[in-house]
Amino acid sequence: MKKMVDYPREYELVFSGEKKMKKSFKPEKVSFLYDYPESMTQFTELAQNLMWESEMMIFDTVIKMTWLRKRFIYAGKVPNLTSHKSGFLYNIAYASMFKNIVGFCPNMFTKCSNGWMRLIMTYIPDFFPDFDLANPFETKFEYPYKYMSLECLVLVYNMEERLELLQKGEEKKMKYGEFLDYILNYVSCHN
């Protein structure tokens, strides 16, 4: 695999930066219903905590749903988790079993938002090489980043150097808008 190049910024910031914020957001125009939260700082902390907790619950759900599906073999067919091409009969049987025995529809986790949860599943072998040897209902699978959100994973999932790009974003403590600009600059310089 070719080593990733950390290109210096050559292109204008599109999603982040002071110029973008001045153009699209005016802090002096912000107020809050019933005077709570009391400040933009408090609002930001509440929103960040909510989003991070929600994403970690989603990540945990993706891990557990993937683990369950990997263990479900039907008529000798083993699931293909990343392409969802396990075969028509397998998919029908799995969906039928879930809807009629488990009592829930798994499509929310396998087909929602053009399959973005499936895109997150593609990282499991990278993050957890021994995934098949542990049980996520008994052992916690820790999310490997503190700054890179699930949206960042989805943004670069199809890039060969995705882990290096995510690591660079993590090292630089990038917010999502900054990571978007970093990837935009990277792709523009790379091509």
Image (cartoon, grey):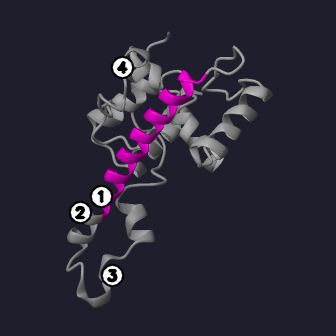
Query: Bounds of the magenta span?
Result: 47-72
Left or right, 66 with reference to 108? left
Q: Residue at x 50, y 9 (%)?
A: 1
Whether label 1 touches label 4, CB < 8 Å: no
- Labels 1, 4: front one: 4
Whether label 2 touches label 1, CB < 8 Å: yes
How packed mark 4 is, by other alpha carbons closer than 10 Å (few <14, some 14-19, many 20 or more), is few
> Which residue in the structure is indicated by mark 1?
48
> Which residue in the structure is indicated by mark 3?
30
Q: Compare marks 1 and 3 and give the one earlier in the sequence.
A: 3
> Which residue in the structure is indicated by mark 4?
134
Q: Compare marks 3 and 4 and give the one earlier in the sequence.
A: 3
Q: Amino acid at mark 1?
A: Gln
Q: Is residue 88 above or below residue 43?
A: above
Q: Compare marks 4 and 2 and give the one earlier in the sequence.
A: 2
> Which residue in the structure is indicated by mark 2?
45
Q: Is residue 104 visible?
A: yes
Q: Residue at x 62, y 50 (%)?
A: 113
- Labels 4, 2: front one: 4
Q: Residue at x 25, y 73 (%)?
A: 40
Residue 171 magenta-drawn?
Answer: no
- Labels 2, 3: front one: 2
What is the residue that sits farthest to the top in this orientation? 1
Q: Secondary structure at mark 1?
A: helix
Whether label 3 touches label 4, CB < 8 Å: no
Q: Secondary structure at mark 3?
A: loop
Q: Is residue 15 above or below residue 156?
A: below
Q: Compare marks 2 and 3 and give the one earlier in the sequence.
A: 3
Report the Cα–Cα distance between label 3 and label 4.
48 Å
Q: Secondary structure at mark 2?
A: helix
What is the residue that sits farthest to the bottom in this orientation? 34
